[in-house]
Image (cartoon, rainbow, N blue to C red):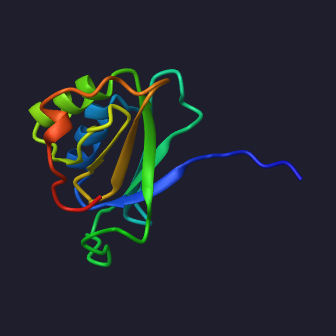
Amino acid sequence: MALKYLHTMVRVKDLEKSMAFYELLGLRETRRKESEGGRFTLVFMAPPGQEDCPIELTWNWDGDEGLPSDSRHFGHLAYEVDDIYATCAHLQANGVIINRPPRDGHMAFVRSPDNISIELLQAGEALPTKEPWASMENTGHW
């Protein structure tokens, strides 16, 4: 039996706001489907060169009040980054809360506008610890 990974779907409340968040992470729109009959939009986003591993943002035109406020039923998405400190600094400078700072130079967590937990992992070995990250406390939950 052959099996091929296709994508991970997350439901979003504000498509433009969610797309802007994933763009900050470095993902780009790879394709889009609008369904007039179903009243929804699907936007597939992936890191450049990894178009075969997208996330699917599903936006229901008439709203989606069924989404839980904390989205913990989902788990998390995980992305490897070249420099976890630079990535977190970039996200923070753009208004993203670093829920679990990269105190260990290896792992951090942030949340999308829809409370999807995003794990960021340092490529290769952990970076040496450094401030302000080493002494930064968690914010909220991740």
State which quadrant residue 11 falls in.
bottom left
The foreground one among 78 and 31 is: 78
Is residue 45 in view? no
State the residue in front, 16 or 53. 53
* Rendered position, 136 above or below 138: above
Q: Measured from the top left, where is residue 29 in percent x and y?
A: 39, 34
Residue 67 in percent (x, y) is at 31, 73
- Residue in the foreground of this view, choosing between 19 and 68: 68
Residue 17 position in % (x across, y down): 20, 47
Residue ID at (10%, 31%): 93
The quarter of the image holding the C terminus is: bottom left
Q: Tell me if 102 is positioned left or right of 48 in this view.
A: left
Q: Which residue is drawn at 31% across and 39% down?
A: 22
Q: Which residue is drawn at 63% across and 46% down?
A: 6
* Rendered image quadrant of residue 108: top left
Q: Nearer the viewer, residue 120 or 71?
A: 120
